């Protein structure tokens, strides 16, 4: 597992110009990193044009960017070199998922570092050297090792696709241009790539602007949601307080009404008790007098009867 990790690190920290580990690495504005001497050598050739481009993504810069050493990347590369010095030599052999060198012979081939879009072959570090030393090969386009080189070959004429047809919106070879695409609006693939790269950059800017706008809308919506939650919570608390006070007020009023009813009850009962007592006394007096009259009605003394029945 440690060896596989070293391989991955070596790929990630190799200069795409010299294909070796970065030496005094510098990072240009598009984000790609190179050896200082490699990128300066490339840009020295562009001084006459005044337009400088990234060898990988082809993004252009005007004026020539100032180069500063990437200290953090330099430290990582130094640590990687230490690990590679202690690694066994067979780490350069191609493994599952790697692109094997087309020039290596034997049962085990070394891992290819770059692929040539002109030769349509992939080469390891050793077999790639002619592309840096032979003048005719120096002009070839090198890319990171790929298994999809056949996509750059015309299936009809078996020639390299170097031309883009605007009329049919596809890549063609030079034989296609004089055959089926005669009279069509065509440009070189490199020129079309530059144009598409510019359009892609504008599209990316538009997407970034839309992302920023959506992020702003999202932030505002989140703030509105939080504000709504706080407002709802405050309304719930106010409602609880109001209803609590209302309940207490109703309870107090109920208690007061009950007390008033009891007071009225006591007053009316007291008044009724007085009337009852008075009526009972009157009834008793009437019964006493009725008994006297009953007794008088049975007396045989006429004189006593007449004297007792005198009206007042």
Image (cartoon, rainbow, N blue to C red):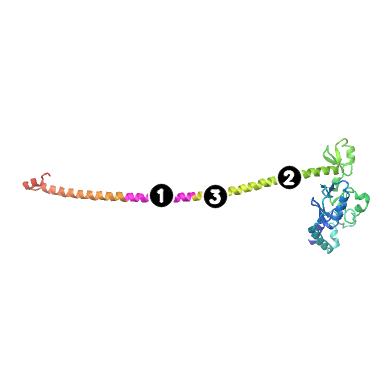
Q: Earlier in the sequence, mark 3 or mark 1?
A: 3
Q: Position of residue 295 (x, y in %)?
A: 12, 49
Q: How many labels does the image show?
A: 3
Q: Where is residue 15 in the image (x, y as percent from the top left)?
A: 84, 55
Which segment is the magenta one? 242-265
Q: What element carries label 2?
A: helix
Q: Answer with the quarter of the image where residue 24 lies.
A: bottom right
* 260 in the magenta segment: yes
Q: In the rendered structure, find residue 73 and report the number of the disc placed on it.
A: none
Residue receiving disc 3: 234
Residue receiving disc 1: 253
Give how far apart the Cα atoms at labels 3 and 2 are.
Answer: 40 Å
Q: Quadrant of the C terminus?
A: top left
> Which residue is depicted at the point 56% across and 48% down?
232
Report crowding for label 1: few under 14, some 14 to 19, many 20 or more residues within 10 A (C-alpha). Answer: few
Report crowding for label 2: few under 14, some 14 to 19, many 20 or more residues within 10 A (C-alpha). Answer: few
Q: In which quarter of the image is the N terminus?
A: bottom right
Q: Where is residue 309 in the image (x, y as percent from the top left)?
A: 10, 45
9 w.r.t. 223: above or below: below
Q: What element carries label 1?
A: helix
183 w.r.t. 49: above or below: above
Residue receiving disc 2: 207
> Which residue is depicted at the point 70% across and 46% down?
212
Give how far apart the Cα atoms at labels 3 and 1 are.
Answer: 28 Å
Give how far apart the Cα atoms at labels 1 and 2 are.
Answer: 67 Å
Q: Where is residue 170 in the image (x, y as percent from the top left)?
A: 83, 40
Residue 170 visible? The answer is: yes
Residue 96 visible? The answer is: no
């Amino acid at each position: 597992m440690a060896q596989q990790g070293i391989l991955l690190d070596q790929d990630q920290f190799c200069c795409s110009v010299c294909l070796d580990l970065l030496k005094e690495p510098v990072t240009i504005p598009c984000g790609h990193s190179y050896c200082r001497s490699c990128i300066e050598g490339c840009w020295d050739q562009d001084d006459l044009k005044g337009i400088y481009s990234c060898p990988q993504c082809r993004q252009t810069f005007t004026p020539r960017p100032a180069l500063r050493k990437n200290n953090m990347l330099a430290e990582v590369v130094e640590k990687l070199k230490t690990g590679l010095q202690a690694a066994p030599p067979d780490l350069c052999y191609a493994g599952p998922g790697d692109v094997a060198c087309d020039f290596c012979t034997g049962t085990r081939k070394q891992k290819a570092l770059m692929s040539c879009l002109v030769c349509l072959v992939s080469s390891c570090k050793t077999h790639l050297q002619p592309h840096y030393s032979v003048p005719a090969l120096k002009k070839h386009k090198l890319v990171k090792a790929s298994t999809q080189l056949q996509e750059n070959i015309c299936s009809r004429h078996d020639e390299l696709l170097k031309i883009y047809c605007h009329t049919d919106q596809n890549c063609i070879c030079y034989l296609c241009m004089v055959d089926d695409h005669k009279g069509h609006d065509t440009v070189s693939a490199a020129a079309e790539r530059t144009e598409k790269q510019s359009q892609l950059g504008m599209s990316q800017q538009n997407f970034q602007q839309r992302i920023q706008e959506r992020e702003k809308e999202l932030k505002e919506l989140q703030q509105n949601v939080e504000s709504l939650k706080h407002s709802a919570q405050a309304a719930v608390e106010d409602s609880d307080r109001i209803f609590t006070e209302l309940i207490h007020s109703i309870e107090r009023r109920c208690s007061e009404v009950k007390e008033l009813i009891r007071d009225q009850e006591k007053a009316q009962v007291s008044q009724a008790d007085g009337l009852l007592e008075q009526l009972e006394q009157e009834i008793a007096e009437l019964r006493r007098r009725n008994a006297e009259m009953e007794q008088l009605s049975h007396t045989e003394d006429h004189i006593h009867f007449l004297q007792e029945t005198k009206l007042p």
